[in-house]
Image: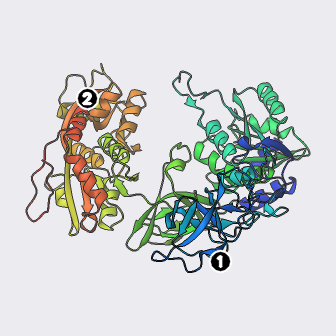
Amino acid sequence: MKAQSQFLDVVTRDEAERRFREHLNLTPLGRETVPLHAALGRVLAEDVAAPIDVPGFDRSNVDGFAVQAADTWGAMEEQARSLALVGETLAPGIVPRREVAHGQATAIATGGMLPRGADAVVMVEHTDAEDGQVQIRRAAVEGENVSYAGTDIARGETVLRAGQPLSSREIGVLAALGLAEVGVYRKPRVAIFSTGNEIVAPGAPLPTGAVYDSNAAIIGAAVEELGGLPVRLGVIPDDEALLSAALARGLECDAVVFSGGTSKGEGDLSYRVVAALGDPGIVAHGVALKPGKPVCLAVTGGKPVVILPGFPTSAVFTFHEFLAPVIRAFAGQPPERREHIAATLPMRVNSERGRTEYLLVGLVPTEQGVAAYPMGKGSGSVTTFSSADGFITIGQHTEIVDAGAPVQVQLLGQGLDPADLIFIGSHCVGLDWLTGELMRQGIRIKAMNVGSTGGLMAARRGECDVAGIHLMDPATGVYNLPLLTPGLDLIPGYGRMQGIVYRPGDARFEGLYAAAAIAAATTQPGCTMVNRNAGSGTRILIDRLLGSAKPPGYGVQTKSHNAVAVAVAQERADWGLAIDTVARQYGLGFIPVQEERYDFVVPKARRDRAPVQAFVALLQSAAAREALGGLGFALTTQPPLPETRCISTS
């Protein structure tokens, strides 16, 4: 009951952080000595003073002749100065045996030690040597083409400071000083495991209802990025004794982090196990964040113990918000520099009052600035965090952020690396193939799947290069063309067969045509559908087929053809509308309803951009026609309507 009462005592993000850090010593954990070849990415634990001069001697920067500069004065192409050659050649590593006197010169190679008496080097290109003499055809000044001892690094000079991360550049400096080992801060060891009977390690068979353990992989990689050493303890089932044992093993490390079992549910055991800790134990269980409310923060014996929510996006956010700064401090890494960029929200966003919300966004450059598109797949999404550019923070007292509102986006990486080609619109496996080919050509792609209507609106606002759409005009039954507005071009794509998907052998659909199947589905009791989201091209077709009927499942709105197929395959629904390509992937029965057009809309202002031209060229290529045909798409073109510009790909 102790942990549950704490969960009900939800605190703000700042209060949770204060309580957590109050009991932690945010300094490096210690130092160790590592070979230079193993020091990349580590953090220096002490200042490095140069034990030698670099260079350690006066050396030549070019191939040529070491001379006294005064002997070359007045030398020019038309009137050379002749000097006698000293009888030695100074290659790198050779110590000079003879002094260069007035009227003499010594042959010297790049990196060779400058002989006594010489104060300059004349490049070989400005000389001619024969019969023991060298003709100097260009005058030199004292110090020309010479690096004097200690001019790069002076003995005793502090060249690197404690706390400095070691990149290849710093490694080069240490090597130049002759250091084979270097003192660095010890990597914090972070124990990581996941909990839950439904969690399966990657590589193992996946039973129905189970999910692969992505959280441990994400967190383990993040720990390494932060300078820590992940200690992976695997997947622990929902067993209190096993969880206690795993926690005990984890506390042999410097920090413990695991995911799952932190809510109030009957089977959530993690908080019970952590609640047994003391000194001080749990400091916050429930933080007013979205995503990430169920996070549990504890400290015992100066070691952080964090239970992350089970959903991936929630887990990643709360890890980076609370534990990542601690790991950086333990590893001696400098605090993260969080970069922000001003942007505009292109659509209205609703938020839950009472919780600070972190909304992941994708950034799209426009003529008016930068648009921040919400990446709204929910806290259970694995891909959202990896495809987002940053996030905006919505305060706990804000319920609505209107379309067009200015926002500050905190970038997830260092700087914004803009894509060459931006796709916004409806998803299609054919588009996946096209974008993959473009990426292999070296074109950087950003694709955001917001549905056909969202893509069309983005194209009208000039926020994308290409929008994939399949929208049927209810008045004419024609796809896409009637919906174009001035300033937009249409690039014909391909046909996709939409149809009813069902489980093979279902007598309610087997052997029927579309009209009979729809009639059966809407009249037979217990026949449940899975719908598509409003604004999608498929939803427009569904509503046209159903008329005023609202069969069971009509309110269940999914966002992709794949989601429809999965719901039918897993018997959560009996039928839905999807394309035949997806039906084949899931082994479902398919009743053709109507071929739709999946076309591409391009803002005219972006039509002549080289990446857009590359996309059109690829779409027109024989390779694309063969690949798309192999995926089951019909490569025919729809004739343009009057007064509509249509770019033919036939």
Q: Nearer the viewer, residue 238 or 514?
A: 238
Residue 583: name its quadrant.
top left
Q: Mark 2 or 1, which is nearer the eye?
A: 1
Residue closest to the far top: 505
How many residues crowd around disc 1 within 10 Å: few (fewer than 14), some, or many (20 or more)?
some
Q: Residue at x 35, y 30 (%)?
A: 574
Q: SS class of the residue under badge 2?
A: strand
Q: Check the picture and name the quadrant holding the N terminus.
A: top right
Q: Which badge, 2 or 1, is on the more N-terminal residue?
A: 1
- The residue type indicated by label 2 comes to Phe
From the top left corner, tell me how far across and down residue 581 is, in percent: 28, 33
Q: What's the residue at 36%, 57% (across, down)?
A: 421
Q: Position of residue 173 (x, y in %)?
A: 72, 55
In the picture of the structure, the residue carrying the numbered disc 1 is: 70
In screen coordinates, is 540 left or right of 294? left
Q: Is residue 271 left or right of residue 414?
A: right
Q: As drawn, which residue projects farthest toward the front? A: 131
Residue 190: image quadrant is: top right
Residue 417, x across and y down, in percent: 48, 59
Between the C-alphas of marks 2 and 1, the distance is 94 Å
Q: Name the spot of residue 374 as percent of width and height, x first.
A: 48, 58
Q: Which residue is depicted at the point 68% across and 57% down?
A: 288
The foreground one among 85 and 62 is 85
Per the image, label 1 sits on a secondary structure element best described as: helix
Q: In the figure, 73 relative to 185: above or below?
A: below
Residue 59 can be seen in this image: yes
Q: Amino acid at mark 1?
A: Ala
Front residue (pair 351, 488)? 488
Q: Which numbered circle lies on residue 544?
A: none
At 55% from the left and 43% from the top, the residue drawn is 380
| Residue to which mark 2 is pinned | 590
